[in-house]
Image: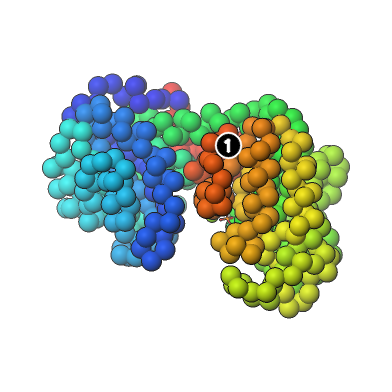
Amino acid sequence: MKTIESLGDLRGKRVLVRSDFNVPLKDGVITDDGRIRAALPTLKTLLAAGAKVVVMAHLGRPKGEVNPDFSLAPVAKRLGELVEAPVTLAEDVTGPSAKAVVEALGEGEIALLENVRFDARETSKVDEERAALAAEFAALGDAFVSDGFGVVHRKQASVYDIAKLVPAAAGLLVLKEIESLRKATENPERPYGVVLGGSKVSDKLGVIANLLTKADMLFIGGGMVYTFLAAKGYSVGTSLLEQDQIETVKGYIAEAAERGVDLVLPTDIVVAPTFAADAPATVVSADAIPDDQMGLDIGPASRELFASKIAACKTVAWNGPMGVFEFPTFAEGTKAVAKALSEGGMFSVIGGGDSAAAVRLLGFDEATFSHISTGGGASLELLEGKVLPGIAVLED
Ligand code: ADP
Ligand code: MG
């Protein structure tokens, strides 16, 4: 992996940095700045080296169109506070404003381009379109540092194509993420448990086939549970359900049994009639979810079951909250898993934007986990043992 040192003396050079600033916002206010803070070591290193730092980042899914709701303005402000220097935000991605802002940068100064996903070419499936945008990025920089771990699994212009046009290197965050995640995937100390939850069910079901060949225990919580319960023939009321994945999940259940993987499903569920913070919650058996109720958390018996089995693991990777932790009534399952990891003394890796936000929101000390990844999809793909395009392109 090429490192920042391989780029040589950076004084006065324009260095493009891809960061992951895809932070949660509520009414224009950043509710968790973890990803911005995670980008600081690389940015401060480059600034201290006298580089002219030009940061590329995305926010949300503006679908290739300029949309002020997805402006990086709140990020520029917060980043400025954290680096203790003004961060100029260009008004466009590679247009006249970006050119002028980069032109005006002095040594050890930093600027941010506007949301790269305002340009449809960023995420285009057509190689030539991405390459054209990457060429415009390349005109703004003499070197490229890839530090947006959350996007290294994406073949996108500011992640992948740019690395082919100017001297490129991995940033400190990307290096640290890879090192920690490899520790969990290449010869993990056993028993090795993987805890999966959250709401991106169809995305995450796909990784299970692969994880069944690697993990000793697989815990399922969050919105994913209901497709498993349905595969077992239970009715799941109005819970999240991937109807078209039920057959696939039946296959996973059979394969887990064949391979001797302990597939741990909740035995009880916290249900409510509506998806709301103040919805009246009841605990029911996992095979008795009423037709007019939805599962929003794992129940108390399941929390104990999960916690005791997790405690026996020497390595645990966790991706996805166990319930709707944003509502205190439905945060207990997520809290129980976080507590088991925090107190377990095992090598623990947490991936997924919402999972990382959850442990902070629920008041856990980040230092009690071995590694909190800034990447959801990227960390899952590394756990699966996949080659990530944004990393492969940085290999020597
Ligand atoms: P991550 O960002 O950690 O990868 P996801 O984005 O997949 O996780 O999912 C996080 C979201 O999943 C949270 O907002 C949480 O409220 C939601 N969630 C968890 N359990 C359920 C459930 N049973 N029903 C609906 N949403 C759920
Ligand atoms: Mg998420």
Q: Position of residue 214 (x, y in %)?
A: 72, 36
Residue at screen point 45% across, 25% down? 1
The image shows residue 321, relative to residue 226, as above or below, that is above
Decide which of 114, 46 is in the foreground and name it: 46
Residue at screen point 53% across, 36% down? 367
Q: Secondary structure at mark 1?
A: helix
- Count neighbours of disc 1 (C-alpha within 10 A) and say few if under 14, some if 14 to 19, many if 20 or more: some
Name the residue beneath numbered marker 1: 368
Q: Position of residue 293 (x, y in %)?
A: 72, 74
Ligand 2 in which quarter: bottom right
The image shows residue 225, relative to residue 88, as above or below, that is below
Decide which of 365, 162 is in the foreground and name it: 365
Decide which of 248, 257 is in the foreground and name it: 257
Decide which of 377, 88 is in the foreground and name it: 88
Quadrant in the picture for residue 74: bottom left
Quadrant in the picture for residue 365: top right
Query: Would residue 319 be found to the left or right of residue 244 on screen?
Result: left
Question: Which amino acid, by three-letter code, is at mark 1?
Answer: Thr
The image shows residue 239, relative to residue 260, as above or below, that is below
For the C terminus, give its image quadrant.
top left
Residue at screen point 20% across, 26% down? 11
The answer to whether one can see residue 307 in this image is yes
Query: Would residue 214 be found to the left or right of residue 12 on screen?
Result: right
Q: How is the image coloured?
A: rainbow
Q: Position of residue 121 (x, y in %)?
A: 36, 53
Q: Is mark 1 within 8 Å of ligand 1?
A: no
